[in-house]
Each structure stands twice: as structure tokens, then as C-alpha cells.
Image (cartoon, rainbow, N blue to C red):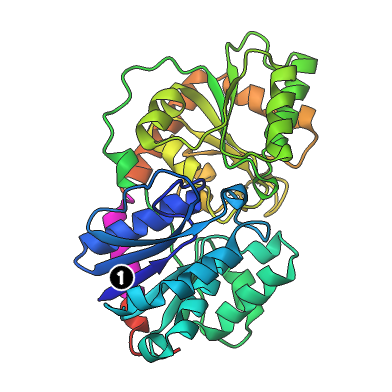
Amino acid sequence: MRILVVSLELVTAPFSGNGVLAAAQAGALAAAGHTVCVLSAAPAGAARGEPPALCRAVEVGVPREAWGRLDASGPWREFASGAADAATTIAAAPPDIVLAVDWTGWLAAAALKAARPDAFAQVPVLFAAFRVHSRTDGAAAVMDAETGAMRGAAAAAALCAADAGALAALAPGRAAVAVLIPPLRAAIRDLPPPDAPQRTLLTCCVRLSPEKEPHRFVALVEAAAATGAFAGLGIRPALVGAGRDPYAASLRARLLDAWPGALVIPDFLDPPALAARVLDRTLLNVHPSLEDAFGMTVVEAGARGAPTALHGVCGGGVGGAGAPPRSSIGAAALLRPGAGEAFAVDLSASPAAAAAAIASLLSDRARLASAGAAAAARVRAHDERAHGAELGRLLEACVGSGV
């Protein structure tokens, strides 16, 4: 098949797991023998990135000051406008199908089709929601785009069952939404194994944006500093993630105020740097969101032997006493708290209670090591090739279905 992948971030200056996953999918599809072109945005002045292997790339410029946002404050209008301008270039080798990532990708794909209906009117679109943004972003543009995508796409896919249900509710009566669990990207899988690292970091590695809720991690570190919950455990908090707005700046300042020796990295790191500077030194990763479509760094930390504490309700909570832990984080479908591959912690509790729960985990190094080993084995078995084959089958089913 000839496949066009439309994703706001992918080639140049990626800033979130969405760009990482879009690149992994494009590369996996190309490796499987499909002809893949990627259409993405690039912030003004940024050094051009390298497209996934075997993929052709078309990039459109967007304002640098709007970069780094996936919500309605990001450069979605400029991306759609640029996609329309690129329509003739892409029409020279028209695709059999479009894979549109998130609401921004759907709008760009729609603009592309509107600009050259002669080339694209009959090309079906698979809407891939890496996150259902209307669940957290009340902007009309977001809701309208996701609703339009669910009504107009040939098929839809999400990263977790909760998001699939949310998408289905936007367009009752349409076919079921497929759930595709993201893979471990090859750029992490193929790194040399950690070399007997000294693991001292208590890490939070997410995009510093409100929907990811990194403030919960900062608050629990503040509580631990006040109560002494982490005293004697030999750990160093680490806050790693891109973000240039006042929210991100305030979190970094708060963490350093509470724990002056904390590690703060305000950049989106490439795989070797992410592993060497962060993941291989991480004793426990904390994924701070109460809900998340997936959580790529949960999987990548696990691949490097660092287990994750993620939000979940255990025991007498959801499911009743003795029930397996349940989590609203998509990555928990791959790294299962009930199977010793991750840890469920109630991160909706008070910061002091959350800090105490984290301290309990940190005090049992043997348990952490066991969970890290189990996580590494689990995620390395779920690679890009298997994921690409599954996605390819879904795309093939859409071809010829119309739009």
C-alpha cells in the first residue's frame, strides 16, 4: 500500500510520545514493505530532523512559539493550512490511505483533501487517536474535530479501551474502535543493555503539560521533603520533560525549592541520552497522570529495567477486596501491576499519602529489581514489527471502503 501518515509532530523537534509513536508506526509500516510518506509540521528555525527509515517526508512550517502543544493552543491552524499548500506535492504520488494522528492530523488531512479533491476525494482515512483530547480540552475546535473524525473516517483506532469508548460515544452506531497497544520503539530496544547502573533516581518523565499532571509528582516530592518520607532512601528526584510555558517553569522551580539537589532536564531527549542520563539511573519511575491513553515512557523505562508506579486502585477499591489492581493508564494493559511488572499507587490521594506509598516501594530494592526485570522481558516481546503488522492489517481493511 501507499500510506500517508499525517501527524503534527514526527520528523523535526518531536516533543511528546505522540511524535515518538507516529515515527515508530511509519517506520514499521515502511519496514513491512509499504510505501510511506509522512506529512508533519516543523517549528520555524529548527534544524530539520531525519524521517523514519525508508520514509519520504513532507514538512510544513509553523510558528516556533506555538510549538510543544497538542491542545487548542498549539499550531493546528497553521498545520492544516500548510497541509493544503502541500497537497499538489503529495498528489504527485497519491496514497491509497491516510493515517491521521489525533485531531490535529485529522484537520490537516481534511484540508489536504479539500485542496485537491481530484486526487484525494476517494482516499479513505484511518483516524488514530493517540489521545482523546476532548476528554481534557474543552475547546470547541477539539470537540468538533474529534466528532468530525469519528463521523467521517473510514475507521478509527485508540491506544486504550477507555479512549476507544470515549471515541465511540462521539459517533454512536458506527463500527467499533480498534485498540492498538503501542510498541517499544526500536531506537530504545536496540541500545546496549544497561551496564550495572547505580539507580538512584525517582523519575517523572512526561511532557510538562497539565493533561499529563506532573504537578502530582512535584507535590508528592514536596510532601516527602516536609515529612521526611524519603529520608535514608538515597534517592534523587528527577523531573524530565519538555515544556516552555509558565506551568512547566513553575513545576521545575517548585521541585528545586523542595529538593535543591533534584535533577531537572527541560529537554526532549533522544533515545541514547534518555537511557544514559535518566532511565538507566532510575530506581522507580512515577507516571503522574490519573488517566492517560498510554504513557510511552512507562514502556521505555521498563525496557531499561526501571519499573513504574502508576495510578491505580487496589484491594478494597474498584473491584472489591482482593481484586487485581486496576489502572486508567493505557500502558497498564502491557505492563500489568497485578503481574508484578508495574506498581499501582493511588495518586489521587493526598500528596503525603502518595509520598508514603512511594517510599514503601523505594524501601524494597529487591522488589523493584524483580519488577524491572519482569517489565523489560514483557516490553521487549512487544516490538515495532508486531505492532506494524497489526496496524497494516487495519489499514488494508480500510482501503476501498470509501470515506
Q: Residues within 10 Å of mark 1 (few under 14, many from 20)?
A: some
Residue 365, percent from left and from top = 50, 19
In this view, 74 is above or below 339 = below
Q: Is residue 317 above or below residue 376?
A: below
For the C terminus, give its image quadrant: bottom left
Which of 128/315 is in front? 128
**Residue 238 or 97: which is nearer the viewer?**
97
231 vs 119, nearest the viewer: 119
Q: Residue furthest left?
A: 33
Residue situated in front as seen by the camera: 207 or 135? 207
26 lies left or right of 140: left
Task: Residue at 37%, 55% (x, y): give it.
Answer: 23
Q: Position of residue 22 (x, y in %)?
A: 41, 57
Q: Main secondary structure of the magenta part?
A: helix
Residue at 63% in and 40% down: 208
Left or right: 58 in relation to 166: left
Highlighted magenta segment, given as a residue range: 382-395
